[in-house]
Amino acid sequence: MKALIAGGGRGTRLRPITHTQNKHLIPIANKPILYYAIEAAVEAGITEIGIVYNADSLEVPNYVGDGSRWGIKITYIPQEKPGGLGQVVQLAEPFIQKESFIFYLGDNMVVGGVKRFVEDFERQNVNCLLTLSKVKDPERFGVPEIKDGKIVRVEEKPKVPKSQFAVAGIYVYDSHIFEAVKNLRPSNRGELEISDAHQYLIDKGYKVGYTEITGWWKDTGKPSDLLEANRLILDNITPINRGSVDAQSDVAGRVVIEEGARIINSKVRGPAIIGKGCVIENSYIGPFTSIGDRTEIRSSEVEYSIILRECKILSVGIRIESSILGNDVEVVEANGKPRVHRFMIGDQSRVEVA
């Protein structure tokens, strides 16, 4: 069994952060999303992983490396331009060859890993195993129609969903999927839809099974999804203090304080993670907050937020909440008169002021 991870795409719904960073490298609880997918495959006993990445950028290969840190081998597969998940599978055939494989969308997260899905695939003796999750907005996903315990149809982003299930971004296939993707035609949005490949397998009489994700699953395609995934991961962290906390500070709950971080006259309420070399002074860090490495927060309050590395939040008079700050962002108190707001904001940003 091999693994294929989709690590390309443009992350348009996460702009402006993805203008300068691959969406799969955005950190959740201070660890890139893509690492969770890799670690899930490794935990399932997989030692060969293929990662499809945007051919015009070496950001993912350079950041992730050859896989030696996990004791595995990673093969990189370039994608010249986004063409749908069906195209991703097409590109991977020389890497996969005739083996079965798990296909994991690199911006998806699921509790409990993927080993059980591999076991279900083998136990059910199917050609394709789909993972399903009940969602509030199935029209955003591929949606299965189920009759008598069998999937009879899969429709991509339907206007009228046939069920409350979404096909989650984790699939297990044998080599028949390559026959399916070779017979695809571009959809109305110009992509080779993986849902159409699943429908091809159904129509040709191949065995398509499914298993329901009973815990949480997140497609981190929107800012609100990132924050929710961050909350879910932080809710299970093990507290540890590798930094320093002075006598005037109060740290409570599950809090990770990384090496070189300093907490000075501040309150930190877990679950939260404070990255390496951070300085938190005269401030409040609330639950479900991730603070990236070398970030400086003074005389300010932050809660339920993701703050990336090397940011500065200085003397901000109102609590920052439900926010995502990219790398090297500064939010500072205005000096001088008149007191004004000054912004330098990229495309598709959102700012709320009080």
Image: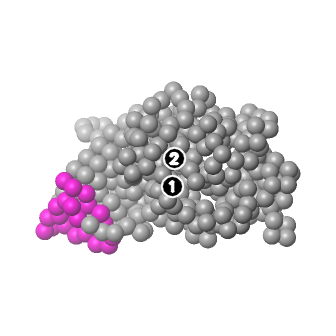
Pick whichever, 16 or 39, lies toward us: 39
Q: What residue type is labelled 2?
A: Ile
How many marks the image carries: the answer is 2
Tag 1: amino acid? Ile
From the viewer's perspective, is 144 left or right of 28?
A: right
Q: Give percent across and percent down for residue 154.
A: 79, 54
Q: How crowded is mark 2: few (under 14 residues within 10 Å), some or many (20 or more)?
A: many
Q: What span is in magenta?
A: 241-260
Give the residue drawn at x 32%, y 45%. Answer: 309
Q: Splitting the image into 4 quarters, where does residue 239 fall?
A: bottom left
Q: Which residue, given by chain and number where applicable, does mark 1 sit on? A: 46
Please provide percent x and percent y for residue 150.
81, 65
The residue shown at (25%, 69%) is 251
Residue 258 falls left or right of residue 206: left
Q: Are marks 2 and 1 in contact (CB under 8 Å)?
A: yes
Viewport quadrant of the N terminus: bottom right
Q: Residues within 10 Å of mark 1 (few under 14, many from 20)?
A: some
Taking the view exactly as shown, the residue that stands out farthest to the left is: 247
| Residue in front for this viewpoint, 121 or 10 | 121
Q: Position of residue 286 (x, y in %)?
A: 35, 64
**Left or right of 183 on screen, residue 73:** left
> SS for tag 1?
loop
Is 183 situated left or right of 255 in this image?
Answer: right
The residue that mark 2 highlights is: 49
Do we see residue 292 in this rendering?
yes
- Please check the rendered image and state whether residue 40 is part of the magenta-colored stretch, yes or no: no
Residue 254 lies in the magenta-colored region: yes
The answer to whether one can see residue 23 in this image is: no
Quote the CA–CA distance across marks 2 and 1.
7 Å
